[in-house]
Amino acid sequence: MLEIAGLEVEFRTQRGVVRAVDGVDLALEAGSTTGLVGESGSGKSVTALAIMGLLPEPAARVIGGSIRLDGVELVGMPEAQLRRRRGSEVAMVFQDPMTSLNPVMPIGAQIVETLRAHLRHDRRAARRRAVELLDFVGIPGPSERLASYPHQLSGGMRQRVMIAIAIACEPKLLIADEPTTALDVTIQAQILELLRRTVDERGMTLLLITHDLGVVAGVCDRTNVMYAGKVVERAPTAALFRAPSHHYTRGLLQSIPRLDGPRKTILASIEGLPPRPSDGLRGCPFAPRCPARLDDRCWDEMPPLERLPGATAAHLVACWNPAPVPDERASA
Amino acid sequence: MSLPEAEIGAVGTTGGRDPADVAPPTGLWKDALGRLRRDRSAMAGLAVIACFAFLAIAAPLIAPEPPSSRTYLERLEGACCPGPSAGHLFGLDDLGRDALSRVIYGARTSLLIAVVSVVIGLGIGLVLGALAGYVGGAADAVVMRLVDIMLAIPALLFAIGLVAALGPGLVQLMVAVGVVNVPIFARLLRGSMLSVRESDYVSAARSLGLRPARILFVHVLPNALSPVIVAATLAMATAIVEVAGLGFLGLGNPDPSVPEWGSMLANTPRFLASAPHLALFPGIAIVLAVLGFNLIGDGLREALDPKFRR
């Protein structure tokens, strides 16, 4: 239902032009949950903003590629039409629930406002619906809570309210940009569970953006790993965890602390820093940090995102020298 | 549902309540008012201003004499400006008018000018500030250069020039003092709108497809307004001083039957040695009113500033 092809987004800064998203392809099937993983600056949030049509113009703009939602091209669509689609067809849950609600407005009014912006609800119907939504996202005493102000709710409750607002008009696509990063761990699990229940019960498609592979493992059918504005590996989530083949993905997985390992293991990290645009790399952006780089090819030529040899057709990797898929029979 | 209830525990805004009990909704403004009420100096300021407001409204009932009625008896005895006495608590002025009555009536004019001029300044300043802060681009550049020019001229000098251009009169006085405040309000609102515009809840509102006008009036403006409200309160104090200054310079209200504190001071230097009370009482009134507005303004600033919140 969402097809992104060759998306390129540039930021003009005082120190020159930065290509934040560099040729991203992404296809989301209706009803699927897709993860977009990467570190800060890898372009995952910018991709989300581009889908929403909310790039901070004129500093940032889409310079190439297309974003189609149910076959309708969103790139270059007039702002008024984009605005009508925002909230009703695509909605977004933001990272920090502490700052994403208007502090001077009761939460009920914020839900009603969204409902009335897109649906022809009268006030009473909108209010009734707001109570239903708050109930759905697990806010106790929803009708009394309508009059609460954001500062009277905890972080987890506020994120529930944000989800209620985002799904108010039954959007087909829900984008969650680091929805749990600002919450503490016990609440994170609840919010992820709520997100999964929401898309299951309401038949929505979810694009989950995070830097946390654990979050992806719990929620997403498919996972895309982004590095320096490019998708470097894409696979069904289980396959990705079983056989990470891009060396960046492997590095990410190895740098997760484990409870079941020996106690004094030194936590693995990926040496070096992500490339800066001024580095003028021609080849693979991960080459300077890659433990398995080939001397000429990796520096000179960007590898295409292709089917990983020996894996399922759905497992794609952009690497000249991917880690081999472990032999299923040997490990079984 | 035990988990969300555990979350409610973090809700308590009113200490000592049962966490499961749903706290009554209190808005930002109600919260601020609650903090203001606990601020003793702000309350003192409010009391002072309330007293002046009461004097202004009830002047005909309270003042012992109408503001322009003259007592000729004393003048015939040749003594200029007798000081306070039982019959005239603040004494008489050079024309034999009761100073107490004129100070009381003066509260009317001075407060009225202060309030109306600030409202005029706010009206123009908010429109300009919103234009600069929300529309941005060329509108921002034009408005802000205009504001810079206005700020480059000293306030009182600017007001004098405006009164000179507009001619004498109460309304002209209000306009002059009000326009002087325009650049201050415009600049403040612009700055706070720029920061609110980048806030997460405005991004969230945009991501929900709300209309730009709605985002501006419902999400940006109410959140950007609090520093301007503080400035407006403080501007009342400045306005009183400016009106008094203009009155003292002879550019105040030309109608002698409508007394005003600054104009009352205008004649006093001639009699300062023999009749200091003529300068004293309007002066005290000015100082008290300015102090009152400043105390309220400072209290409001603390009540509305998130840094002072618990």
Image (cartoon, coloured by chain):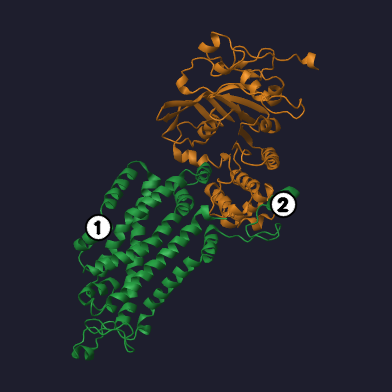
User: Measuring 36% from the left and 48% from the top, which residue is drawn there?
Assistant: B131
In the image, taking residue B113 as reference, residue A321 lies left or right, namely right
In the image, taking residue B118 as reference, residue A146 lies left or right, namely right
For the residues labelled 2 and 1, the Cα–Cα distance comes to 60 Å
Specify few, some or many for label 1: CA neighbours under 10 Å numbering under 14, 14-19, or 20 or more.
some
User: Measuring 20% from the left and 88% from the top, which residue is drawn there?
Assistant: B75
Q: Mark 2 vs mark 1: same chain?
A: yes
Residue A257, placed above or below residue A135: above
State the residue position of label 1. Answer: B158
Residue A142 in percent (x, y) is at 67, 54
Image colour assigned to chain A? orange
Which mark is drawn over residue B5? 2
| Viewer-side label of 2, 1 | 1
Q: Nearer the viewer, residue B249 or B136?
A: B249
Q: Is residue A125 visible?
A: no
Query: Considering only order in the chain, which callout, 1 or 2, is on the residue closer to the N terminus?
Result: 2
Residue A118 in percent (x, y) is at 54, 46
Among all residues in the image, which is located at the extreme front? B273
Amino acid type indicated by mark 1: Phe
Image colour assigned to chain B? green
User: Measuring 41% from the left and 68% from the top, which residue is drawn there?
Assistant: B292
Amino acid type indicated by mark 2: Glu
Residue A251, placed above or below residue A33: above
Residue A190 in percent (x, y) is at 70, 42
Residue A96 in percent (x, y) is at 58, 42
